[in-house]
Every structure is written in structure tokens, then in C-alpha cells.
């Protein structure tokens, strides 16, 4: 993973003429882990929660609170998607902690997620406002604003996808730099001793703060920001309709 | 034989361009620091609204970060998947 000469995702498998890259492979693993966790936590639900059910209810309740708090009560139906997105992004960003390549350090993954957000925004906008209403909303102050509004709507998913990608890829590169530098330093310090010299012993404890920042803090923050921006823009597509009616 | 080969010339100028691109980070630093300062003022005035202020601050900083991320991606492209090196063969 800590290889600076090849920072893109590798193809690790081949089925027929289809290559499976690291991103797809680990993305599927993360999805499988999430499904297994979900099934295990939701197994044998009781009226009075106990044990793992308490944690499951806490997670679900906090997601619903966040969604209703920032999108409004009428947008509660979006909570399952937002919660899933949040969990998937956290786990996908945190893969660097286990020594794998984070799935979101690939522009294909982030653009797929941003495209989903874009489709959600457009679908809800057209559904709540109608085709004419949406066009009218886009020509709102003056009809000359119409091209600008189109650029705004298209640039949102691009910036959303690139933001997540850039943050996580930056973390990956900085981690690779730190590990390569420590390997080089440990060869300088103890390189003359026959067997221990080849061991990158400085990589043991020193990268922990960097690891903490780029593999724990930043993933949670970026997942939160991605989910939060999705929520804000979807709720804007829904809310502007209600202002329209009044 | 020329003093500088075309590949070395393009690679060197690309490295320079990659470093110049990241000047965009200056603006982000100023913007994010300003946002954090205003958030501290808000928390000092209303300590009970700390959660909301923190959440809004993080989202605002993330949006302000976008231009820097674009600059970062341009410099990554220049350093690792340089399009000009392919063109000169």
C-alpha cells in the first residue's frame, strides 16, 4: 500500500474480460461487512432493548435525529439512505487503518456516489415542483440566470466527488511519504547491523498520530461532510417547492 | 547533445507547476482560520449552541476547501499521470 510509484488502484482480479480493481473488491467487502453487521444486530429484536439492540437503536435514532434536524420533519424518508451512505463512507475511508487502500481514494467511487446524490436532487426537484415549476424555479429572478443555474447544478456533484477523493487521496499520499521516510531513516540509523538493519523499526510507533489523523479523524469528518452536504442539497430541492406554493 | 533533454525539461517544469498550483492553499488557510475564529466567538457568546456551531463550521470549512482540493488534484495529475510527458514520447 505504501508505494509512491503507483498511487492508483490496482487490478487484482480478472473475471473473463472484466478486471476487478481494489476499489470494487474492497467496496464489496465493506458492503458485505455492513450487511452482516446489520443482520446480526437486527436479529431477535425485543420489546425491551438489551445488549446489541441498544447500540443498534442508538445508531438508528441518532441518524434519524440528524436527518430530521437538518432536513426537516417531512424528509424523514431519506434517513435510511443517509445512514447507509454515512456508514459506507466511514468504513470505506477507514480501510487504510487495516493496511488496505481506502475505497474512496478512487475517483470512480466518489463520482458514483456524487452521481447518486445528483440524481436524488434532480428527481426530488422534478417530483415536487413538476417540470414547468422546476424550469420556472431555475429562471427565478431573471431568465438570464438559467445557464448559470444549470452550471451550478452540474458543478455541485463534481465538487462533491472531488472533495472526498482529494481529501482521502491526500491522506494516502502523506501516509506513504511518512512510511517511506521512516524506512529510509531506520536504514540510516541501524543499517550497518546485519539482520536488524533491514528492519524498518522506526515505523512501529512514530506514525501513530499521523495514522490517527488520516485514518480515523479525517474519514469520519469527510463521511459526515459528504452526508451533510447531500442532506442540505436534497432538502433544498424539496423545501424550495413548499416556499413556491405559499 | 543538448544540455537539457525535452523529457527533463517538461518534467522539471511540471514539478514547478505542481508546486505553484498549491499556492491556492494560502486562501484556504485564511478562510478556514477566519471561519474557526468566528465559530469560537459564537461559542463564547452562546456556549449552549456549541454542537450546532461546530457542525455548521465544519460544513462551511469543507465547502471553502473545494478550490484547494481542485488545485491539489491538478498538482497530483502533473506529478503522477503527467499528460505532457506522453505527448513528447
Image: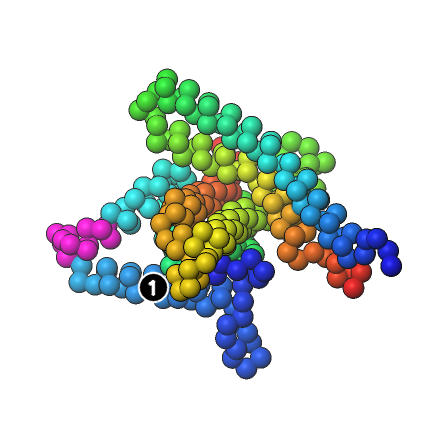
At which x and y percent is residue A7?
56, 59
Q: Is residue A103 left or right of residue B15?
A: left
The answer to which of A245 and A60 lies nearer the viewer is A60
From the viewer's side, name the closer residue of A34 and B16. Answer: B16
Q: Is residue A94 visible?
A: no
**Quadrant location of residue B6?**
bottom right
Task: Determine if the magenta segment contains residue A51.
Answer: yes
Q: Report the number of numbered marks.
A: 1
Q: Residue A69's spot in the image, x, y percent?
A: 36, 37
- The residue singled out by tag 1 in the image is A33
The outermost residue toward the top is: B45
Percent position (x, y) of residue A12?
50, 72
Image quadrant in which you'd find residue A45: bottom left
**At x 64% / y 36%, what residue is drawn?**
B23
The residue lying toward the viewer, choosing from A31 and A238, is A31
Q: Residue at x 34, y 26 (%)?
A: B49
The chain carrying label 1 is: A
Q: Residue at x 45, y 31 (%)?
A: B57
Identify whether A217 is placed above or below A87. above
Which residues make up the magenta segment? A46-57
The answer to whether residue A15 is above or below residue B41 is: below
Which residue is at the front of the view, A15 or A75? A15
> Residue shown at 50%/75% (left/top)?
A13
Task: Examine the rendering and report whether any part of residue B42 can be seen.
Answer: yes
Q: Does the stretch in magenta take in A75?
A: no
Q: Position of residue A103 (x, y in %)?
A: 47, 59
Amino acid at each position: 500500500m505504501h508505494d509512491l510509484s503507483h498511487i492508483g488502484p490496482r487490478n487484482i482480479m480478472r473475471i473473463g474480460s472484466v478486471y476487478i480493481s481494489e476499489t470494487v473488491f474492497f467496496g464489496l467487502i465493506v458492503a458485505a461487512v455492513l450487511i452482516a453487521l446489520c443482520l446480526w444486530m437486527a436479529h431477535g429484536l425485543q420489546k425491551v432493548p438489551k445488549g446489541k439492540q441498544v447500540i443498534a437503536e442508538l445508531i438508528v435514532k441518532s441518524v434519524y435525529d440528524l436527518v430530521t434536524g437538518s432536513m426537516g420533519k417531512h424528509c424523514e424518508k431519506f434517513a435510511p439512505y443517509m445512514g447507509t451512505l454515512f456508514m459506507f463512507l466511514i468504513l470505506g475511508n477507514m480501510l487504510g487503518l487495516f493496511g488496505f487502500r481506502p475505497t474512496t481514494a478512487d475517483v470512480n467511487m466518489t463520482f458514483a456516489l456524487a452521481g447518486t446524490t445528483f440524481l436524488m436532487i434532480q428527481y426530488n426537484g422534478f417530483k415536487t415542483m413538476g417540470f414547468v415549476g422546476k424550469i420556472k424555479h431555475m429562471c427565478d429572478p431573471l431568465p438570464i440566470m438559467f445557464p448559470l443555474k444549470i452550471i451550478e447544478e452540474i458543478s455541485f456533484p463534481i465538487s462533491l466527488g472531488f472533495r472526498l477523493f482529494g481529501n482521502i487521496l491526500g491522506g494516502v499520499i502523506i501516509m506513504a511519504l511518512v512510511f517511506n521516510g521512516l524506512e529510509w531513516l531506520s536504514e540510516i540509523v541501524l543499517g550497518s547491523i546485519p539482520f536488524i538493519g533491514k528492519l524498518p523499526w522506526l515505523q512501529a510507533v512514530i506514525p501513530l498520530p499521523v495514522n490517527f489523523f488520516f485514518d480515523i479523524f479525517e474519514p469520519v469528518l469527510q463521511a459526515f461532510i459528504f452526508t451533510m452536504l447531500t442532506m442540505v442539497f436534497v432538502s433544498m430541492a424539496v423545501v424550495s417547492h413548499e416556499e413556491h406554493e405559499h | 547533445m543538448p544540455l537539457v533533454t525535452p523529457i527533463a525539461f517538461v518534467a522539471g517544469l511540471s514539478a514547478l507547476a505542481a508546486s505553484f498550483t498549491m499556492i491556492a492553499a494560502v486562501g484556504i488557510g485564511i478562510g478556514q482560520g477566519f471561519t474557526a475564529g468566528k465559530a469560537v466567538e459564537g461559542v463564547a457568546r452562546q456556549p449552549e449552541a456549541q454542537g450546532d456551531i461546530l457542525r455548521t463550521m465544519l460544513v462551511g470549512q469543507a465547502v471553502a476547501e473545494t478550490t484547494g482540493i481542485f488545485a491539489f488534484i491538478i498538482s497530483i495529475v502533473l506529478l503522477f499521470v503527467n499528460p505532457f510527458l506522453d505527448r513528447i514520447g
